[in-house]
Image (cartoon, rainbow, N blue to C red):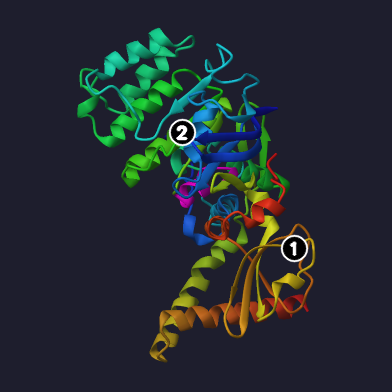
Amino acid sequence: MGRCVIEFRIESSSGAPPYRQIVHQVRQALTLGVLVQGDQLPTVKEVVGQVTINPNTVLKAYRELEMEGLAEGRPGVGTFITRSLVGSSLAAHHKLQVDLRRWLHKARSAGLDDASIQALFESTFRSASNEEIA
Amino acid sequence: MSALVAEGLGKRYGRRWALQNCSLSIQAGAVVGLVGANGAGKSTLLHLAVGLLQPNTGRIDVLGRRPGIDADALTTVGFVAQDAPVYDSLTVADHLQLGRRTNAIWDRQLAQDRVERLGLDRRQRAGRLSGGQRSQLALTLAMAKRPELLVLDEPVASLDPLARRGFLADVVEMVAERGSTVVLSSHLIADVERICDHLIVMVEGQVAVAGPVEQLLASHKVLTGARRDVRSMPKDQLVVQERHTDRQTTVLVQADGPVLDPGWIVSEVGLEDLVLAYMTAGNAPARALRAVAS
């Protein structure tokens, strides 16, 4: 399995259906530049053997990626990435991460524990995305 | 196409019905998880499917033939019984030879490759293998028949987590490669959730609910609200389980349409909670519920 570019992880306890976990991990790999256009995704048999899930789950995830225009199935060959998502955004990641670390440090000095930090992030994230929609 | 069809299937041991009114249809290529308490009739159903038992009522067709009646019914059915029975005094090599001689179809290469990959010593007697190795040997024998239907009765119950994962990985790889149908009984819902796309819940010798996992999860909801009498629920919402405190009512319902009553907080249900609800409820909902197996 040396030619596999990525490996999936399936968390039984995460609550998210396994096919959605695969779609999410492919998207994540695309934004991080781990996967780029032309890469072949692991075959259904490879994924099934690695993470022990139903083959239809993998097929469903790959179909969804095709529908999103991120991948393309070539009959008898495999599923390939058709688009790279990494672009100008990756360059900005580093600076944003530095900012975020600084912010985290501030939050901890103010006495927030991990749970409070996560809660604060999530509620801010949600209200900010709501404002953008509205 | 259906790999297995049961109609009004029943099996009695003396006066006790181990299985009753069992009607099911399992489509080819499905990976079916069979769950239920001990004594719920899971093994009886599986033994009927592989012709080890004959029904008292109804009929069962497996791959278009009747197990135990049609002579060649089991040529393409693989079976691993509970506790992975192997012959203790025979070596691993003996088992492979036995398989080759007693089966019409025998994939010698597959059997040899598997034994090698699993690191089984061909000269070792089966009685001296570990539980995991015995299961893998039994699975090897079942798989080398190149079965269209593989029936596994609690195959991983006695295995450690690593051996269990390895065993199940081999089963799903076979499904991915050959599109075989698999029916496996298990108490481990987490395993069922990972590898099965269809589910059958058995309660007290009857099928309580059956269907594609996705469809079952989509059609069951947990409703929470102020305490109320659930007899006033709309007709299309079938109560599987209800719980009450002084002030609150929580119900698990089977409802294909949306729940519109604003008095309920509607949440999704996980597979484990769904199975437990049917197991706790007994057979009351089964009588009202049409099995959605397809």
Q: Which residue is mark 1?
A: B237
Q: Give the magenta part as a residue range.
A: B188-200
Q: Which residue is mark 2?
A: B152
Q: Position of residue A9 (x, y in %)?
A: 47, 51
User: What kind of residue is marked 2?
Assistant: Leu
Q: Nearer the viewer, residue B189 or A50?
A: B189
Q: Is residue B174 left or right of residue B267?
A: left
Q: Position of residue B147 (x, y in %)?
A: 52, 21
Tag 1 near tag 2, CB within 8 Å: no
In the rendered image of this protein, does residue B214 appear above or below residue B259? above
Instruction: Write the residue at 48% across / 35% down.
Output: B14
Q: Position of residue A16 (x, y in %)?
A: 57, 58
Chain at numbered mark 2: B
| Dot 2: element | strand
Q: Earlier in the sequence, mark 1 or mark 2?
A: 2
Instruction: Write the residue at 70% across / 27% down.
Output: B1
| Dot 1: element | loop
Chain at numbered mark 1: B
